[in-house]
Amino acid sequence: MGSTVIITIITLSLLALASSVILYFVAQRFRVFEDPRIDEVQAILPAANCGGCGFAGCRNFAEALVKAETFEGLNCPVGGATVMNEAARILGKVAEVVDPTVAVLLCNGSPEFRPRTSRYNGASECRISHSLYLGDTDCSWGCLGDGDCVRSCSFGAMYMDPVTMLPVIIDDKCVSCGMCVKACPRHLIELRKRAKKDRKIYVACQNCDKGGPARRACKVACIGCGKCVKVCAFDAITMENNLAYIDAVKCTFCRKCVVECPTNSILEINFPPRKPKAEPQAEVAKV
């Protein structure tokens, strides 16, 4: 009886030893080496895991930075230049100069300008509404107002205005992660170059219908008249599909297009009030 127990113990011990040896060699054969710099880079990232960099999370972005030969096309919109410069210092590389951006809503169709002509009682999600019907107004291009973009924002940089029924973007909180851009099924949110004092000039309309139908659906719709294109001396405005578009990089904020637009579809944000034009004085009749 005693010898049986001893044999059993020895057998199990040998099996355990053999298994350990096999596992050791397997682990050595298939081990994955991970660059310790990945942890260093991840530590300086904002840990937002927002996907604005184009990767699944900050860990994946850190791995991409370490493995990349250059930082071309790689940027953390949340951390900005400060984080990218620090990552470049750790890895001995050069960070690209990337202009900061901010989200803007390319629609100004509040009920004041775009009356509601129908009512939808289905699921209150833009992606569902967009796939089922044209919207509760005569404009099939405008904001549906169900707030998918607001719910997608992890930084509290958006809210729905109960009066305009449109999303409002808070510039100071916007980190340009791009999640709201992806959430909008009608492509009404764009990341534009952030200028000094958060000044912006852009066409707040995406209606590609011709002038008449567009204007009937919304009083502030772009009617594709082309007056803004003609008045711009910097080639910053182009016309395509009956719709004007202002290039944020080329725009010099001269604001001539804003005055020229007959439907007020071009918005000027955070600019000082315009000075009233001086009335011409009547000439004094000579005696």
Image (cartoon, rainbow, N blue to C red):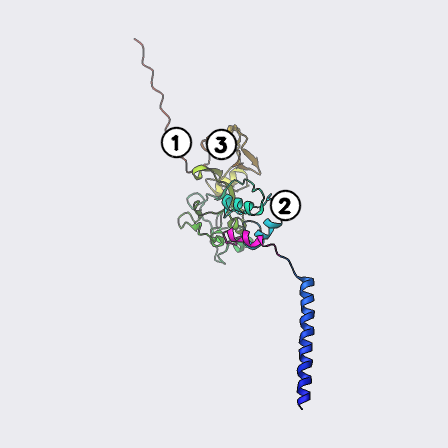
Image marks 1 and 2: residues in contact by CB distance under 8 Å: no
Q: Is residue 86 left or right of residue 162?
A: right
Graded by Cα atoms within 10 Å as few (under 14), some (14 to 19) or many (20 or more), the crowding at tag 2 reads few
Q: Indicate the quadrant containing the N terminus: top left, top right, bottom left or bottom right.
A: bottom right
Q: Residue at x 53, y 56 (%)?
A: 128
User: Which of label 3 and label 2 is nearer to you?
Assistant: 2
Which residue lies most toward the top here? 287
Residue 249 among magenta residues: no
User: Which of label 1 and label 3 is nearer to you?
Assistant: 3
Q: CA distance from mark 1 to mark 3?
A: 16 Å
Examine the rendered structure and indicate whether residue 183 appears above or below residue 246. Answer: below
Name the amino acid, label 1.
Arg
Query: Is residue 21 visible to us here?
Result: yes
Q: CA distance from mark 3 to mark 2?
A: 35 Å
Determine whether the residue tagged by mark 1 lies in a helix, strand or loop. loop
Determine whether the residue tagged by mark 2 lies in a helix, strand or loop. loop
Graded by Cα atoms within 10 Å as few (under 14), some (14 to 19) or many (20 or more), the crowding at tag 3 reads few
Graded by Cα atoms within 10 Å as few (under 14), some (14 to 19) or many (20 or more), the crowding at tag 1 reads few
Q: Which residue is mark 3?
A: 252
Q: CA distance from mark 1 to mark 2?
A: 50 Å
Name the amino acid, label 3.
Thr
Examine the rendered structure and indicate whether residue 101 appears above or below residue 27. Answer: above
Q: Which residue occupies the foreground of this view, 253 or 32?
A: 32
Q: Which tag, 1 or 3, sits closer to the chain's start? A: 3
Q: Residue at x 41, y 44 (%)?
A: 112
